[in-house]
Image (cartoon, grey):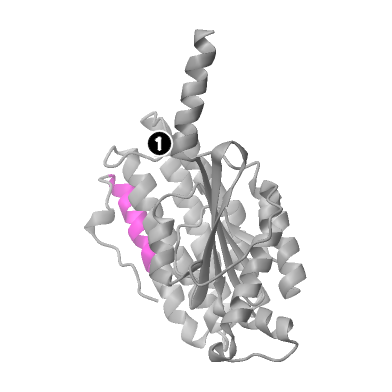
Amino acid sequence: MEKILWDDKFKIGVDKVDKAHAKLFRIVHKLFDMSEDVEANPTKYREGLKYLEAYSMIHFSEEEAYMRSIRYKGYAQHKRLHDNFRDKTLVALKKDLEMSSYSANAVQRFAEIMNNWLAEHITREDQAIVGRVIAKKGFDLSSQVPIISRAVNKAAMEIFQLEATLVSSEYKGQNIGEAFYCQNCYDMDGGIRIQVLMGVEESLMLHGAGRLSGMRVVQPNEITESAVRRIFELLFQNVTKVFRIEEESKIDKDNRLTRDEFRTEFMKGYPCNLLFSTRNGYFAFCYRSWRAKGQRNKASEESKENGAD
């Protein structure tokens, strides 16, 4: 993991908030440094995790009080991000650590997700409090998250025989370790297009390839390209039923993405970004939808004609 270090670019100009942010960075980095001997002393790491959780909650409370004091218009959305982190992301990450018995890999994943979340939150949301950036108003997809989560969990059980737990409903595209990536696009009625991005951590893909072949697969080079494509086909086919997509998902080499291609595609803007954890690794699911340009013009023309009648 490449640590994101605290520096002046993260300052928002409110002394109490800036000091708290700097301390949070130090706590996360200390937890990462402890990963080398965490398996020998998980109790020490648990105590460090409790301290991070307690300090985060104190900081959130103080930051929210400051936002109220200046009557910040984005308060409700910002507080919702804090609540989601506290009630969902942190809870799921802690569960992942427990399930892995605080393995070094799980600890490193935890530290990287925390480090990226903290950096992204400060630069996008906290800087907006003082007007240095404009907070991007998100789409309210909260009603869809439970539905998609159930579909992902069902797919994980059928394909991997593993339970999938939602870690974050605000996945920022951060690295999930060595992984396989894929995209697919679907044409819907009315000219609507739906694009789906998926990322499967290498360890989870190894597990899936083993189940698919009925043989033990322990090394990445033992995973055949056909097995990777078949697993993605099954994932797309299962999860996209949420959007009433019944067509069979075919995956070829053009659908597969490198890590950099995934990141580039992700940066185009996906309003629904979910990160799941299983006992054998992480799974990322993102989707966006739009009306095709030709269909938008057609709808506009039809509207004008109807208005003229």
Question: Which residue in the structure is indicated by mark 1?
Answer: 67
Given the image, on which type of amino acid does mark 1 rest?
A: Met
Check the image and report above or below for 242 versus 222: above
- On screen, residue 31 versus residue 147, left or right, reads left
Residue 157 vs residue 295, the one in the foreground? 295
Residue 172 vs residue 16, the one in the foreground? 172
Q: Position of residue 25 (x, y in %)?
A: 37, 64
- On screen, residue 225 versus residue 143, left or right, reads left
Quarter of the image holding residue 218? bottom right
Q: Residue at x 68, y 55 (%)?
A: 247
Magenta stretch: residue 108 in it? no
Whether residue 42 appears in this view of the structure is yes
Q: Residue at x 54, y 45 (%)?
A: 193
Q: Position of residue 22 (x, y in %)?
A: 33, 60
What stretch of residues is rendered in magenta? 14-26
Magenta stretch: residue 23 in it? yes
Task: From the image, give the main secondary structure of the stretch colored magenta.
Answer: helix
For the N terminus, the image quarter is bottom left
Check the image and report above or below for 215 versus 180: below
Q: Residue at x 41, y 74 (%)?
A: 30
Quarter of the image holding residue 259? bottom left
